[in-house]
Amino acid sequence: MFQGSTIEISSEALQANLAFIGKVLGKAQLCSVVKGNAYGHGINVFTPMAAQLGVTRFAVYSASEAWQLHGRLPAGCELFIMGDVDGSALEWAVEQGISFSVFDNARLEHAIAAGRRTGKKALAHLEVETGMHRTGFEMEFFGEVLQRCKTDADAIEVAGICTHLAGAENRSNAERVLGQKVRFREALAMAGKTGSGPGMRHAACSAVSLNEPDMLYDMARIGILQYGFWPNRETQERYSEQHGMVEDPLRRVIRWWSRVMSVSTLPAGGFVGYGATFNAEAGTRIATIPMGYAYGYARSLSNAGPVLIRGQLAPVRGIVNMNCITVDVTGIEGVEKGDEAVLIGAQGERSISVASFGDLSDQLNYELLTRLPHDIPRVVVEKHI
Ligand SMILES: *Cc1c(COP(=O)(O)O)cnc(C)c1O
């Protein structure tokens, strides 16, 4: 059945990425970050696939994501909620043995109460504020927090002590990152003194794992890298240079494709689509693809694109519509209705990276991936063609 577009995720690509990540992490354990619908790859499809390849720890952002995964993973897999878990969701997490971050007193109290009521210890990762200024206990109160966990050890277990570093993907932030490192070490020393925890110590995301290996500790929370993307170009260049790497070890797990719905000819001087953003200088062959901004194909790709058809680049002409795009196939021999059109990933010798989807801002991969609509079918394939 034709469904507008399909997202294929490749187990072979993930396996290659996990092998590379294993080398980067050394003795530190991998915690696979599957928030944001597994960065658009489909949480319900990606996560079991990763578990099958041996990943046992997964981090989500919210309790609702943990809820989606709960019961779908093999026995022995652990879930960690990094952000949003409050109210009855917190009680549920405690009952299910799902760990979560604790970054303020309200949640600390709630966790202890829930642990006491359910008779199961709340598994808390104490988050320290080291410089991100998002969430986390301020250092000056952290001693009390540790002490409290010790006093109420029947109801709460310090499963981990963690922080999140801001800006480790750019050398220009070195000073801020260094300050964060120093504060995290202080927090760990405090835990040592109190005799509370530390459980798993973790501070590294993808960029930190690559750029600041002294921050790997016991576990790293890896998102973007496992999907086959570098956090940004600077990190890729720096790591490749330091390790004498010539080839990119990462493989894109995702491949997103649609099909040509119709082909037509635009006469010289004609306009395509709404407005007058593309005026053909000469006769132009236009292929229409049922893929628009309603399906995650950004409007910013208007008069840009491109997509791949018959192994060649076909640029978007005119603006991206709600439900379709028009692409230029003038130079591509024999394009016809039904031809595959690749939006992200490889076809033949060429490929479209998510980044080439627009200007190469650092956060672009993250944003475009996570905005891929949830209702596009995700299909597991062993290998991308
Ligand atoms: C998203 C997130 C990560 C993963 O970041 P990547 O750059 O994708 O590796 C790690 N830790 C926290 C707290 C996060 O929110």
Image: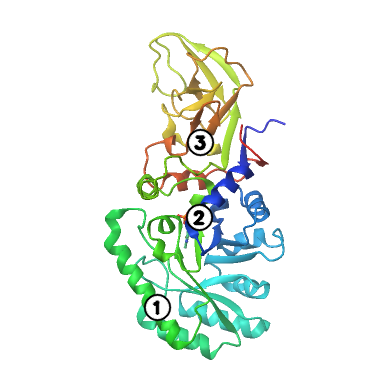
Q: Position of residue 129 (x, y in %)?
A: 38, 72
Q: Which sits earlier in the primary sequence, circle 2 or circle 3?
A: 2
Residue 132 appearing in the image:
yes
In the rendered structure, which amino acid carries the disc numbered 2?
Lys
- Relative to 376, residue 308 above or below: above
Q: At 45% from the left edge and 29% from the top edge, which residue is drawn? A: 305
Q: Position of residue 95 (x, y in %)?
A: 67, 75
Looking at the rendered image, the disc whose residue lies closer to the viewer, 2 or 3, is 2
In the rendered structure, which amino acid carries the disc numbered 3?
Tyr
In the rendered structure, which amino acid carries the disc numbered 1?
Ala
Q: Mark 1: give few (<14), some (14-19) or many (20+) Cα within 10 Å.
A: many
- Relative to 361, residue 145 above or below: below
Image quadrant assignment for residue 299: top left
Most foreground residue, 273 or 364: 364
* Beta carbon of the mark 3 residue lies under 8 A of ligand 1: no
Residue 297's tag is 3
Give the residue at mark 1.
187
- Which element carries disc 3, helix, strand or loop? loop
Apparent side of residue 119 relative to residue 210 in the rendered image (left or right): right
Give the residue at mark 2.
23
Q: Position of residue 86 (x, y in %)?
A: 56, 71
The residues tagged by marks 2 and 3 sit, at their Cα atoms, a distance apart of 35 Å
